[in-house]
Structures are given as structure tokens and as C-alpha cells.
Image: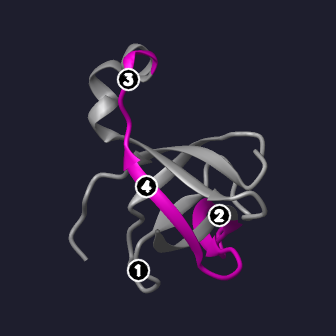
Amino acid sequence: MEKVWIKRPVIEKDKEKNTFEVYKEVGDPISMNIWPASGTVQAEVYGKELKYIYNANVDKDADIAEGDAIYLKKDSKHPAYNVLYVSKPYLKHKVLELKAWPEKEN
């Protein structure tokens, strides 16, 4: 299990009323089990993008939504993953589909 930080996109306006998206931290860090996507169905859905897709398990009560960004370090400037899909809760967990963000220099 990996400790990760979740940030949610929020639309803000500058002094000139231009809108832009920023990511604001959501709650405490959560534990997440992340592994590469595989299998026939995911290969058919994502095709050549499959190498950027990951699956993850989180606690069923975790505050996470589609579009959220996942950071592996609290002070990182760039997210590691974007949440594509959040399943309905199972007995103890939710299953997520994530897409790796392109790496950028800090």
C-alpha cells in the first residue's frame, strides 16, 4: 500500500476575471494499492493508451472522485495520476482506474 495525497480541481478567477483550474488538497493522505492495467477488456477499451493506465484499490470510505489528481509526494508540483473511474464501493474497498500524467521537471 502506498500513501498518496488527493487534490481536486477547482476553477478560480484572477484579477482580470480569467478562469483557470487549480488543484486543492482533499483531506488527509490515504493508502492506495496501485498496479498496471492489463487484460483483454482494458486492452480493447484503452488500446495504445494501455501502457499509461493503472488500477488501484482504496478504502470504501476514501473521499475520491473522477477527475481528482493523485500525488505520490505531498510537496510535489505535478500529479502522478488522474482518476478516470471510481467503482461503487464493495464490502471494504473501491476500485479505481487511473491514467499516468506525463512526467514534468520540478
Residue 7: image quadrant is: bottom right
Name which of mark 1 and mark 3 comes first in the sequence. 3
Mark 1 touches mark 3? (CB < 8 Å): no
In the foreground, 89 or 16: 89
Label 2 or label 1, whichever lies nearer to me, is 1
Magenta span: 12-41
In the foreground, 48 or 89: 89
Residue 62: image quadrant is: bottom right
Disc 3: which residue:
39
Name which of mark 2 and mark 1 comes first in the sequence. 2
Disc 1: which residue:
73
Secondary structure type for disc 4: strand
Kindly tell me whether residue 11 is visible in this rendering.
Answer: yes
Disc 4: which residue:
34
Q: Which mark is residue 8?
A: 2
Kindly tell me whether residue 17 is visible in this rendering.
Answer: no
Residue type marked 4: Ile
Label 2 or label 4, whichever lies nearer to me, is 4
In the foreground, 28 or 77: 28
Secondary structure type for disc 1: loop
